[in-house]
Image: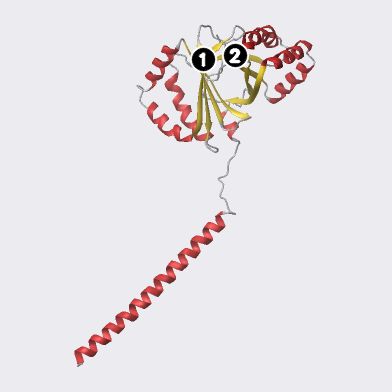
């Protein structure tokens, strides 16, 4: 009888202990879930932002020079491309050479591979936004330019532009002799990744200077945001292939590619031929 009573008593204690443990566990789980829900709910209204001392653009660009760039993409009616090029050759170099306008034509091209029947123009404004505003106001008084704009409009299907700053670690585009082909590689980055991109490419550009292929690197300020443009020059398509393959033979290039690819949302490549009016030949 005594062993039976002890066994019954023991089992009863165990049941109570288990019920107590389950109750405690349920209480802890409920509390954790409540805390998790509160944390999620609070996260809708609270954001921790790391303090930053300067804008991204000031951290990445050449502050002392204050150069502003404008890139223009003109989609031309196929039957009008020759007439469009001739019109640009008559007007754009005169603006470039006139000291009355604080701007320079960096390069002007037709897209060869990529978007067809397209013209690309790159302008530099020394002095930043004030120089851009000055040029715009003066061009409104330039009758030759206003006639040019009117005639140009008849030849275009669409056009768009962006205002750009240049990365501090890239070369500044300067006139070069040809013949060359040019590649414009455009990257749409994930928002918030521009600094990270700049940090990697500040090192990566060192791998791409051996054949003088690096012409210029820019990032957008107005237009499509978080957009990066890299401009490269090659003698021909085979030279481009050899140069790009050669970069993979350098220790560290693979690491740069590995870490920068996840930052990209979309990328595009244009192979471009300079027109007669282009300082970059």
Q: Earlier in the sequence, mark 1 or mark 2?
A: 2
Query: On residue 107, which mark appears?
Result: 2
**Rendered-image quadrant of the N terminus:** bottom left
Image x and y of residue 253, in percent: 39, 26
| Local SS, label 1 | strand
- The structure residue drawn at horizontal position 45% and vertical position 35%, both measured from the top left corner, is 262
Badge 1 density bin: few <14, some 14–19, many ≥20, Cα 10 Å: many
Q: Say above or below: 69 vs 192.
A: above
Residue 41 lies in what quarter of the image? bottom right
Query: On residue 182, which mark appears?
Result: 1
| Local SS, label 2 | strand
Image x and y of residue 213, in percent: 47, 15
Q: Say above or below: 54 vs 29.
A: above
Image x and y of residue 279, in percent: 59, 9
Q: Nearer the viewer, residue 36 or 171?
A: 36
Badge 2 density bin: few <14, some 14–19, many ≥20, Cα 10 Å: many
Is disc 1 in contact with disc 2, using a CB cutoff of under 8 Å? yes
């Amino acid at each position: 009888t005594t062993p039976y009573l002890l066994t019954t008593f023991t089992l009863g204690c165990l049941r109570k202990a288990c019920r107590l443990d389950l109750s405690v566990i349920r209480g802890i789980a409920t509390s954790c879930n409540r805390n998790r829900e509160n944390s999620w709910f609070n996260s809708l209204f609270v954001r921790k932002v790391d303090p930053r001392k300067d804008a991204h653009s000031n951290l990445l660009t050449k502050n002392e020079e204050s150069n502003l760039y404008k890139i223009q993409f003109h989609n031309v009616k196929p039957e009008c491309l020759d007439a469009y090029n001739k019109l640009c050759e008559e007007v754009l170099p005169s603006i470039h050479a006139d000291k009355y306008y604080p701007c320079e034509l960096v390069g002007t091209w037709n897209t060869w591979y990529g978007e067809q029947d397209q013209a690309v123009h790159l302008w530099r404004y020394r002095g930043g936004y004030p120089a851009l505003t000055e040029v715009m106001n003066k061009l409104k008084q330039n009758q030759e330019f206003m006639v040019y704009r009117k005639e140009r409009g008849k030849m275009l299907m669409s056009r768009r532009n962006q205002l750009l700053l240049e990365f501090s670690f890239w070369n500044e585009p300067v006139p070069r002799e040809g013949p060359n082909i040019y590649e414009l590689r455009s990257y749409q980055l994930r928002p918030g990744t521009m600094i990270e991109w700049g940090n990697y490419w500040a090192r990566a550009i060192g791998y791409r200077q051996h054949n003088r292929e690096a012409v210029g690197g820019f990032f957008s300020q107005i237009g499509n945001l978080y957009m990066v443009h890299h401009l490269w020059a090659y003698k021909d398509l085979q030279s481009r292939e050899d140069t790009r393959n050669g970069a993979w033979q350098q220790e560290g290039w693979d690491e740069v590619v590995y870490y920068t690819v996840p930052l990209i949302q979309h990328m595009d490549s244009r192979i471009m031929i300079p027109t007669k009016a282009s300082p970059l030949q």
